[in-house]
Amino acid sequence: MESALLVGLLGAMIGVAVYQVLARNLFGAGLTWGDPMVRVALLWVTMVGGMVASASDQHIRIDLVARFLSPAVARRVGRLTGAFTAAVCFGLAWFSVTLVLWDYRDGTPGFGPVPAWVCELVIPVGAAVMGLRYLVRSVALDRPAAETPP
């Protein structure tokens, strides 16, 4: 589902951006909400892309030290870094809820008829999803892998 959302968002973002360029160059005017929509779509693509990457454990990481560790120590280090990553994601989720609530309370406009809090809602949701995935992964790393029959 996340991958389909990512493809749809990226397609919409590219479509509106291309339309904006063509409309401005050919007709001297574009959509008044086009540029803000592209910025919001970029935020959504970033957060949904992070969720997709965290689901498959393909998120960016620095693993120079882990290559030289024994498997047991590497598992412990992986558990610690996973827990730290989860804590950072949960912190981002917590503080971004404050941003969303402020913009909801203040009625801050986003683009067109869409309020800013709706545009920003992907931040706490995405960060919480990534945090949960890394927390679960860090706990699962502590357990020995289940053996598969030959």
Image (tube, rainbow, N blue to C red):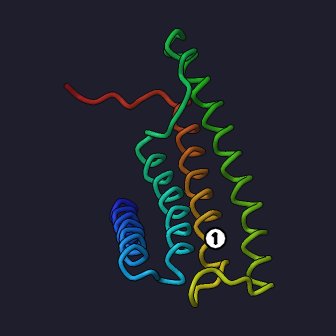
Decide if residue 74 is on the left or right side of residue 145.
Answer: right
Q: Quadrant of residue 123?
A: bottom right
Q: Residue at x 50, y 51 (%)?
A: 50
Residue 90 in the image, given as x and y percentages of width and height: 69, 53
Residue 132 to residue 34: above or below:
above
Q: Nearer the viewer, residue 128 or 106?
A: 106
Q: Residue at x 68, y 37 (%)?
A: 84
Quadrant showing the N terminus: bottom left
Q: Residue at x 52, y 74 (%)?
A: 37
Decide if residue 12 is on the left or right side of residue 36.
Answer: left
Residue 112 in the image, given as x and y percentages of width and height: 56, 87
Residue 25 to residue 86: above or below:
below
Q: Quadrant of residue 40?
A: bottom right
Q: Residues within 10 Å of mark 1 (few under 14, many from 20)?
A: many
Residue 93 to residue 105: above or below:
above
Decide if residue 62 is on the left or right side of residue 89.
Answer: left
Q: Quadrant of residue 7?
A: bottom left
Q: Secondary structure at mark 1?
A: helix
Label tally: 1
Give the residue number, with chain letter if any, for mark 1.
120
Q: Residue furthest left?
A: 150
Question: Given the image, on which type of amino acid does mark 1 rest?
Answer: Glu
Residue 56 in the image, given as x and y percentages of width and height: 40, 44
